[in-house]
Amino acid sequence: MTVKYDVKDLGLAAEGLKRIEWADNDMPVLRMVRERFAKEKPLAGYRMSACLHITTETANLARALQAGGAELALCASNPLSTQDDNAASLVKDFGISVFAIKGEDRDTYYRHMNTALDIKPNVTMDDGADLVSLLHSTRKDLAGNIVASMEETTTGVIRLRAMEKDNILKFPVIAVNDAQCKHFFDNRYGTGQSTIDGVIRATDHLIAGKKVVVCGYGWCGKGVASRVRGLGANTIVTEINPIRAIEATMDGFWVMPMAEAAKLGDIFITVTGNMHVIRQEHFDVMKDGALVCNSGHFNVELDLETLEKTAKSKRPKVREFVDEYTLKNGHRIQVLGEGRLINLAAAHGHPASVMDMSFAVQALATEWAIKNRSKLDNRVHDVPTSIDEWVAALKLESMGIGIDTLTAEQVKYLSSHDMGT
Ligand SMILES: NC(=O)c1ccc[n+]([C@@H]2O[C@H](COP(=O)([O-])OP(=O)(O)OC[C@H]3O[C@@H](n4cnc5c(N)ncnc54)[C@H](O)[C@@H]3O)[C@@H](O)[C@H]2O)c1
């Protein structure tokens, strides 16, 4: 197979390789999958197009899939999340086709996605359902080849479920995000830590004593809120779901509508998967110097289009990942990472240890979908519980943590209705 690529600079490969190996040190479960795949070749003969953040953790997933026998083409699931040294190493050291450059413009981003699809995949992998969208619009001709598609994130699963509801899905998709070993840990602890990492790298600001507004108290929001609180911030949560709002209140956060929080916050972080969560009416009442960023999947959570039109002036790149807008009232709003996922734009995304579980699930779900291809209909399927349990057990083992097992008496008690009263 010929390796094709469009990456920034193959000369960066040596640095990328060191970082891929560093991440691999912290991905023991995925490594076990890779070693088994290398022996059993469960993906032999399959062509896979994967649209994921091109990070060192993704590189290790790609190594596992390649070891399993898959022919791979990778492209980015966000124009700012590619790590160029890592992309170079994937091409040069591992012979994997990659089409991704950090900071690529919209046309290049879509061209890269289309090029990754040119291998005529039988399996696709998405982080945000972009490949699936193309396979249902401009690349419909390729949809008939697809055995299954894996989806990594909440926003992608929401889109796919909407397609399922409208009865238009052309092939089965697997909701990898919904596996417990994915969203319990990756969305909460991964996004929690890496989002703060992104804010700090972009600004060098102190978090302690700041008023930080976290919009959305889902899996990601819980992680972000608990981490900023740990750094000493006064943390405010905004929500639209009453149950999650109570949860945030009882977890000890201030909860209030965005209209009130906008006046108080020093730093705003959106993680809702929704659009225009922070709008002009909110920018207009913010303090001078307020920092605004997003860690939800798409760059639609902040209404930057309106801000761009209504601001008196804009100073792009006052720092590498900061654009400063001056409003008509003279207040400056600092927008981080162009409103794109700040943890991947300004930092390196989730730590390898947590992606170990997410990507072990991805690899095993791919193997499962291929094995069960004749039984899967064109809807959104959950990852089997057995995969979740296997990944969790091995992760615990790798952490040197043992847990109890049920005694025979306990098994009987838990399955009976007449004991212990
Ligand atoms: N940055 C990353 O690396 C990363 C990682 C995983 C997921 N994500 C993305 O983060 C987003 C959130 O994911 P999640 O798993 O936490 O989803 P989730 O569904 O668990 O939580 C989203 C929360 O936002 C709330 N919400 C919706 N609209 C709102 C609004 N207008 N104001 C306030 N709250 C609102 C919802 O009620 C919900 O509680 C998704 O787009 C997901 O794809 C990003």
Image (tube, rainbow, N blue to C red):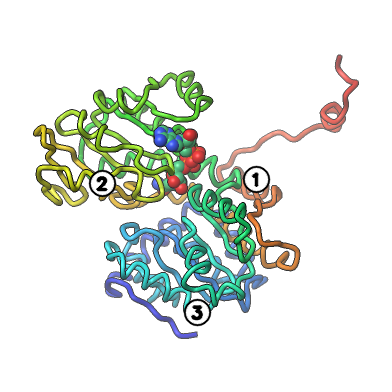
Q: Kindly identify the amino acid type of the residue bearing the numbered disc 1.
A: Ala
Amino acid, disc 2: Leu
Q: Label 3 amino acid?
A: Ile
For disc 3, the marked residue is 119
Disc 1 crowd rating (10 Å Cα; few below 14, some 14-19, many 20+) is some
- Give the label on residue 304, or none: 2
* Within-10-Å neighbours for mark 3: few <14, some 14–19, many 20+: some
Q: Which of marks 2 and 1 is in front?
A: 2
Is 349 placed above or below 370 here?
A: above
Which residue carries the number 1 mark? 393
Distance from Cα at disc 2 to Cα at disc 1: 44 Å
Asked whether the beta carbons under mark 1 and mark 3 sit within 8 Å of each other, the answer is: no
Q: Position of residue 160 (x, y in %)?
A: 55, 54
Q: Is mark 2 within 8 Å of ligand 1?
A: no
Q: Residue furthest front?
A: 166
- Please tell me which of labels 3 and 2 falls first in the chain: 3
265 lies left or right of 143: left
Q: Where is residue 274 in the image (x, y as percent from the top left)?
A: 42, 42
Q: Separation of disc 3 and disc 2 at Cα?
A: 36 Å
Residue 413 tag number: none
Does residue 190 appear anywhere in the picture?
no
Of labels 2 and 1, earlier in sequence is 2
